[in-house]
Image (tube, helix red, strand yellow):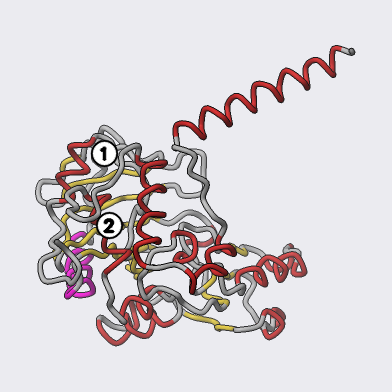
Amino acid sequence: MSIASKAIGFAKKEYNAYKKQRSEERAGFRAISQREAWQLEDRLTVREKQHYCERKAYAQLKYFPNLDAPETYSEKLIWLALHYKNPRIAQLTDKCEMKKHIAQLVGPEYVVPLLGVYEDVNDVDFAALPKRFVAKSTAGWANRQVILVPDKDGADIDRLKARMAEWLYPWNTYYYANLCITDEKIVPRIVIEEMLGGGGPVTDYKLLCFGGEPKIILIVNNRGTADLQKTFIWLEDWSVMPLSRNKAGRDMAPQKPDKLDELAALAKKLSAGFPLVRVDFYEDKGRIYVGEMTFSPGLFLKINPTETDRRMGGLIRLDGIEGIR
């Protein structure tokens, strides 16, 4: 046997051992694909979907959630995703419909200008689009279905169309990525909007609002670069939260944004009436834009330390929502 063959055999053995260890750590949990979830949708009961979410939570959070009497942020977030029924969630999560709501509630000046919305990629007239634009799915999340086009002339339009066409599959939504029972089963469409920031990174301000009150701000600097920085801050005293999650967490608080009062006032108005929602903003050339509204921020993402997970959970009030024991 050659040295190369031995090396390949050793690598496979190590990889299989790693997979076995990870499977044991996750109690044999295997996430189903979004397409599988879409196919199973009508066959699963609410309780079966809860069991799936419990196992997924154990695999990713490293503790089995108590969804019958939730206390931590992660537990309450999963519970809300499973049981909180509000028809406004679909409208406010849809990247196109949300713009109409924002314009009506706080003003069109806070809306990133829309260039077009399409149900078929073949309807997009690329020749008529400006040199710079952003393409995204109405049902996208976590920057997975977003394409920045800083120079249309240098872009591979056929490749771009092929990627955008994939977004239109009915299972390409956040709902089918988690099997949580909310009203976020949005019909995927293609949104084309103006690009902010001159092609460079813009600062993100994400305000977590509990019962209509902004309590926490996540500041994201240098997105898309090697110097990405994410910092969670308590708004009440501008102190850095002891929170590490998904590469987020720093020791020093950045300077307060000049428009912090405006951000907080907008977030309060937009989040009114919801037990939990994160309102995301961009700041570009001194102007504030609403990026999106997220009703399951950080779903299935482990929060360290546990004390922070529990403290944040205390901010979510489930009183009066049907289904809680």
Q: Residue at x 77, y 20 (%)?
A: 9
62 and 173: which is toward the camera? 62
Q: Which residues are magenta?
A: 260-273
Estimate the x, y position of residue 298 in percent, counting from the top left.
Answer: 35, 52
Position of the C terminus by quadrant: bottom left
- Name the spot of residue 293 as percent of width and height, x first: 34, 68
Where does the image place residue 106, in percent across and percent down from the top left? 25, 81
Camera-nearest residue between 319 and 155: 319
Q: Quadrant of residue 183?
A: bottom left
Would you place residue 61 above or below residue 126 in this image?
A: above
Using the image, determine if residue 109 lies above or below residue 10.
Answer: below
Give the image location of residue 174, x and y in percent. 46, 64
Q: Quadrant of the N terminus?
A: top right
Label 2: how many residues lie within 10 Å, few (<14), some (14-19) or many (20+)?
many
Q: Is residue 157 left or right of residue 130?
A: right
Residue 160 lies within the magenta run: no
Residue designated by label 2:
77
The residue located at (51%, 32%) in the rendering is 22
Q: What numbered label is drawn on residue 170?
A: none
